[in-house]
Structure formats: C-alpha cells, structure tokens
Image (spheres, coloured by chain):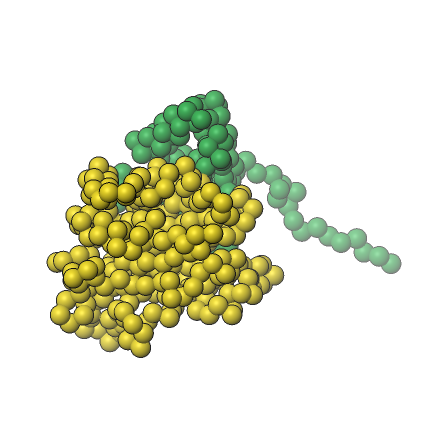
Chain colours: A yellow, B green
Amino acid sequence: MAMTTFLFWNLNKKRLEELVASLAEVHEVDVLILTECEVPAHSMLEVLNRRAGAKFHLTDSQCAEIVIYTKFSPEFLRKKCDSGRLTIRRLRLPGSEEILLAAVHHPSKLYWKDGSQSFECVELSHTIRMMEEAVRHRRTVLVGDFNMNPFEEGMIAANGLNAVMARMIAARESRTVQESEYPFFYNPMWGHFGDAVDGPSGTFYRGSSEHIAYFWHMFDQVLIRPELLGIFRNEDLKILSGIEKRSFLTSRGLPDASVASDHLPILFRLDL
Amino acid sequence: MSISPRNLWPEDIAVTETVAPAAILKEQASLLGERTKNLVEGRVAPSAPSLRGGNFEYAFYLVAPALDNYHYHLFSVSHGVEFYPLTIQPRGSFGLSGLLPRGEVELAVNNEEEFLEELAKLFSSDKTKHIIASLIAQSRAV
C-alpha cells in the first residue's frame, strides 16, 4: 500500500506548464489530470521532467478533452472507455488492487442548460456502471470539471451520479428507486463549501447582478465509490490556492485568471 | 351463456415494415466488424432511463476486442414511442467537426432517410476514421 497523489486542474487553455510542474513537484503528484489543456505534450513533458528524478509520461487516450500524465509507466493506467469528454482508465499499480479512474469535463453552463447537464450525468453514470460491470468491481474514482455544483440534480439524482455529502450514507453502497438499484458516490467536495473551512470557498467564482447568485461554485470535484472510502481520508483532499510564493488568487481572494486559471486545482490522495 | 370476446384490434395491427432505429444501429455495428476484420466492432447499448422521460436511448460504441474491450462512445440517439423525430447526440468534440450547428448539442432527424444520411456523415467523418485507424493500429501492435 502506498499513497498515490492525484492533481486535477482546468487550465483555461493557458500555458501554465511551469505552475503545473511546480505543483507536481511540491505535492509529489503521481497522476496529473488536466482539461482545457493546450500545452503541447512535448512542452509539458519537458517542464515536468526538467527536475531530476521526475519521469512523467503522457498516457494514451482518444479523449480530446482530458490529458493524463503519470509518474509511473503508462502501462499501469490502461484505457478502458473514452468519449469526447470522458475517459475511463484501469489503474493497477504493482502490489495494489485495481481501481477505475474516470475523468470528465462537462460542457459549460454558458452553452448547456441545467437540464442538459443533468441528462449528461445520467449518461455518464450509465457508462461508468457499464464499465464497472465489465471489470467486475466498483472501486471507482470520478474526477473532473463537471460545470455543475454538488447540489445540482444531475449530481444527486439516483439515476444521475447519486453523489451524496456524507460518508455514512455512501457507506450503504446503493439505494433503490422504483425497483432499480443505483450505487452511491461519496462527494467530499461538500465539505469544502464556504469559508468555515481552510482554503478557498469553491473552485470557481462568478459574480452576477441577477437575483440568484452563488458567487463561489464547486465545479471541480472528485467523487469516490463506497468501496474506496477506506483508502481515502478527507484531509487528503485540498483545493489549492497557490504554489510556494505564487498565489492563484487576487487580493480579494478570488481565482486570478491573469496569473493562473479561472479554476483552482484540486489535489487528493488515495492509499492504494 | 358465454359471449366470445370481440377483438376490436385490426388484423394487420402487428404487420409493420418500419425499421427501428436501434435495428439500424445494430446492423451498422455488425457491418463495421466486417470492414475492420473485427479489430474494431460496433456495439449498441440501451442507455439508462433518463430524466428526459419516456424516451428510448441507445449509445453507439466502437469496441476494440484486442485492447481489453476498449470502448469509445461515438454518439447516442434518443427517440420517443414514435421513432421520429429522433435526436443524435455526437459525443464531445464531434461538435467541432461541423456536424452540428454552432452551439447545438444534438441533431434532430425527421425520418429514416435523414437518419441514414446523418449516420453516414458521422461514420465517414475524419474524427471517426481517425479513431478507428488508431484502434486498428493499436490492436495490431498487441
């Protein structure tokens, strides 16, 4: 058993390879999952591997929206299912039980209605369950930029992602609606809302002059199947707001797209 | 005295020449295997009942048996009890291929003829050909 560190970041189509490499080094990242990444692979690899000892690899995929680099050989992260915005991989490190690693980038609310996003969650959930049946286990982690908050219908609906805010509920493993059984995800991002906890109040900020405005959003999330709760500790999940002396936030504490991305990265560890 | 029930249903009620969209998809899925010597096959899977309510949904996958049954979700279709109009939802970056009007996430087709036309466009798009070529090359390398 060993701690494996995952970093997910929406780069907002910016050349942030230096910041990504710093994060990877400081946090000893093993699996780097990027979306809206327009950094050419050769540039990213060059910067990631500039430091002695770092040996990142680009993993193969047909998914255009998600790029994954690993510090271990790509043969340990084999592709299982892709679409334009989703990739599902089998991660099997030597001496560890296999997990499914799924990463997604859902369409933005700028282009899709809330209802369409929820329908997409139903489709996503179905695809994940189909792949879980294919590999005969449900040790699955789903990470990504959902462009949805944890409380939205597609995230919580039973036939959507069925992602609940409490371990105790997720530990029941599944719930039944109209005679159909749906497996839970645990969504630890609920615990990072607001300013009563350390770190930023969300991963994305958008102010608005209309009546309904949340300001902070938790679009970037990691969801964990109950089967993996034993290898995940909540304190091993962080929303990162900077690296070393460089802050990703403005003086008002909001994501600073002029320095980094309009999304903040999330870091989590699993004791694989 | 028993009265034999009168059957009000017309005798030709079950006679139909209509082809279900799922049958069209399954036929095309099987034909892909012929084209690629089964290195890449098609698979049609019914999707979960969605929030759309009452719709029938099917996902079309490219499957590479030699690559641990790797699946690539190419597109989905959904329709009501009546087959048409039917919608095709190309997955992800297919929206960039010019198949869909800008800002649209799905394509509506009104009849079987249009459905076949749009399927042909999808199957012969550069993106589809690229993915299939890549899967064939990888399968041969295993």
User: Residue at the location (61% across, 61% down)?
Assistant: A179
Q: What x and y, as percent, mark residue A88?
A: 42, 45
Q: What x and y, as percent, mark residue A145?
A: 32, 56
Q: What x and y, as percent, mark residue B74?
A: 39, 39
Residue B15 versus residue A232 in the image, above or below: above
Q: How many marks?
A: 0
Q: Residue furthest front?
A: A52
User: Residue at the location (56% across, 65% down)?
Assistant: A172
Image side of residue A39 versus residue A175, left or right: left
Residue A256 versus residue A5 in the image, above or below: below
Of residues A64 and A260, the one nearer the viewer is: A260
Image side of residue A129 versus residue B125, left or right: right
Q: What x and y, as percent, mark residue A241?
A: 23, 63
User: Residue at the location (49% across, 45% down)?
Assistant: A95
Residue B141 versus residue B82 in the image, above or below: above
Image side of residue A138 versus residue A242, left or right: right
Task: Examine the image and state in which quarter residue A76 appears.
Answer: top left
Q: Is residue A39 visible?
A: no
Of residues A101 and B77, the one nearer the viewer is: A101
Of residues A228 and A85, the one nearer the viewer is: A228
Residue A168 versus residue B38 in the image, above or below: below
Q: Is residue B2 visible?
A: yes
User: Residue at the location (55% across, 62% down)?
Assistant: A174
Task: Examine the image and state in which quarter residue A219 appears.
Answer: bottom left
